[in-house]
Image (cartoon, helix red, strand yellow):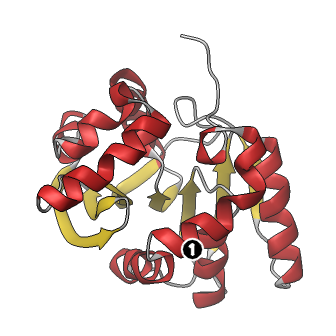
Amino acid sequence: MSERYVPALGFRWLTPLYDAVVRLTTRERTFKHALLDQAALSSGQEVLDLACGTGTLTIWAKQRVPGLRLAGLDGDAEVLARARAKAHAAGLEIAFDDGFSTSLPYADRRFDRVTSSLFFHHLDRDSKARTLAQVFRVLKPGGELHVADWGRAANPLMRAAYWSIQLLDGFDNTVDNVKGLLPELMRAAGFRDVSETRRFSTMWGTLSLYRATKSGG
């Protein structure tokens, strides 16, 4: 399968609008700070923000815990340029790397935490599985994966709202999310203690937080 990235909001011409759209429509500050709370980041940890996009979550993590050894990875050079510019404006030094989730350019057992927000619904089933296998590989034993993404609809209204995401990003990619299958895929990749921890209602549907652990040893 050839590697390709999905531009922010699905189309390159929408990339300049990405930050504003996410901020205004997804309760971004609320769910991303909840994700960082859940990840329990601490100084000295090695952390990967997977599919970091324009770097909002990455920057907030570094501002919260300046002693993190933090990397952000994305396959879109344009959003990485925006992420680097935002980090520079904030006076932060963050390594933003160009690469694909299905072939992470990092050594085995490097990271204590991997975070990801609004990414997995862009991937087809095979790419989700390959990405989770790569995340499992680069996590240290006892390391944790923390994900924010669209989940099983909390009610019919949230299910109807999610149709907009499916029309934009594709039904094949997004169906696993609305069926609540991300935890199952995480377990299939070898993760333990997998759980959906919180849900948020947004104008696009139900946004869920997940956590999973790579067993120690």
- Report the front residue among 216 and 75: 75
Residue 55, compared with residue 151, is above or below; it is below
Kindly give the residue lying farthest to the top in the view shown.
1
Kindly give the residue lying farthest to the left in the view shown.
155
Q: Is residue 187 left or right of residue 31?
A: left
Could you tell me residue 145's position as x and y percent? 36, 58
Residue 26, can we see it? yes
Q: Is residue 99 left or right of residue 132?
A: right
Q: Is residue 55 left or right of residue 195?
A: right
Total numbered badges shown on the rendered structure: 1
- Residue at (43%, 26%) from the top-left corner? 127
Could you tell me residue 141's position as x and y percent? 34, 54
Q: What's under tag 1, amino acid-wise?
A: Arg
Could you tell me residue 72's position as x and y percent? 66, 58
- Report the front residue among 213 and 17: 17
How crowded pointer 1 is (Cα within 10 Å; few <14, some 14-19, many 20+) is rated as few
Image quarter of residue 54 = bottom right
Residue 195, compared with residue 15, is above or below; it is below
- Residue at (66%, 59%) from the top-left corner? 18
Q: Which residue is mark 1?
A: 23
Q: Secondary structure at mark 1?
A: helix
Image quarter of residue 212 = bottom left
Could you tell me residue 73's position as x and y percent? 66, 50
- Residue at (51%, 41%) from the top-left corner? 108
Residue 214, can we see it? no
- Report the front residue among 198 and 45: 198
Residue 139, compared with residue 142, is above or below; it is above
Q: Is residue 169 left or right of residue 177?
A: right
Residue 45, compared with residue 78, is above or below; it is below
- Residue at (57%, 74%) from the top-left corner? 23
Image quarter of residue 131 = top left
